[in-house]
Image (spheres, helix red, strand yellow):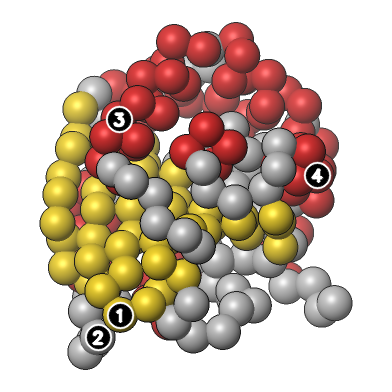
Amino acid sequence: MVIHPDFMSFSVFEEYADEYDQWFLDNRDVYLEELKRIREAIGDIPSPALEIGVGSGRFSEPLGIRHGIEPSRALGLMAKERGIEVIRAVGEAVPMKPGIIWMVVMITVLCFLKKPEETFREVHRILIHNGDLLVACIEKGGIIAERYLARPDKGRFLSHARFYEHDEVIHMITGTGFDITSIDCRLGFCILKFNKRDKV
């Protein structure tokens, strides 16, 4: 397998994978609230669905998403232990055929993408006609971003992140062939849902 050069930027997730996963246990109330909001936004999960940046599988497992893309080997192994079929790859180069996925979910991964537009074009390519994309992200300047950056357990990872305002995210994604269908931005944690347009 050819390893994409952007794998190098994920070394912090390799080195501190256990710490990353432990956060969900140490901050269970926050995690469960985010999970609840995401579940409400998604509704019924179609199959097949894919999470890009599946991490350790903490969202995919309870949501019933069985396929994931993850560049970190350590986190990908954790997700596999939670029943997720993981492909080691990056969002900018998804090794899948066109038009086979019903829904793509990306949770707190946008901020780590070097080339987000390329990722969203890849999402458009692999989605079926009228497929859905859900992006959950920490908003630039929001309460959560400022709080997390000040904490060593989150700041270690988020110091590598680039945050966006939700209007920037919507503009970026609609420019790659999607229509926005729902917006939920509370306390700086935004959940945005899009529907694929066949003509970009």
N-terminal of the pair, mark 1 or mark 3, is: 3
Mark carried by residue 77: 4
- Real-space Cα separation, disc 1 to disc 4, in angstroms: 32 Å
Q: Which mark is residue 37?
A: 3
User: Mark 4 to mark 2: distance in Å?
Assistant: 35 Å
Q: Earlier in the sequence, mark 4 or mark 3?
A: 3
Query: What residue would you read off at disc 2?
Result: 198
Task: Classify residue 170 as left or right of residue 128.
Answer: left
Q: Residue 131, image x and y in percent? A: 32, 69
Which of the two discs, 1 and 3, sits closer to the camera? 1
Where residue 196 is drawn, which disc sits there? none
Q: At numbered mark 1, what does the secondary structure look like: helix, strand or loop?
A: strand
Kind of residue sitting beneath label 3: Arg
Q: Is residue 127 above or below residue 19?
A: below
Counting residues from the start of the chain, the first of labels 1 and 4 encountered is: 4
Mark 1 neighbour density, 10 Å: few (under 14) some (14–19) many (20 or more): some
Is any atom of residue 30 visible in this view?
yes
Q: Quadrant of the C terminus?
A: bottom left
Question: In the structure shown, which secondary structural element does the residue marked by tag 2 occupy?
Answer: loop
Q: Amino acid at mark 1?
A: His
Give the labeled residue for mark 1.
Answer: 129
In this view, the residue farthest toward the right is: 1
Q: Quadrant of the N terminus?
A: bottom right
Q: Is residue 115 left or right of residue 2?
A: left
Q: Position of residue 16 (x, y in %)?
A: 77, 31
Q: Nearer the viewer, mark 1 or mark 4?
A: 1
Q: CA distance from mark 4 to mark 3?
A: 26 Å
Cα separation between marks 1 and 2: 7 Å
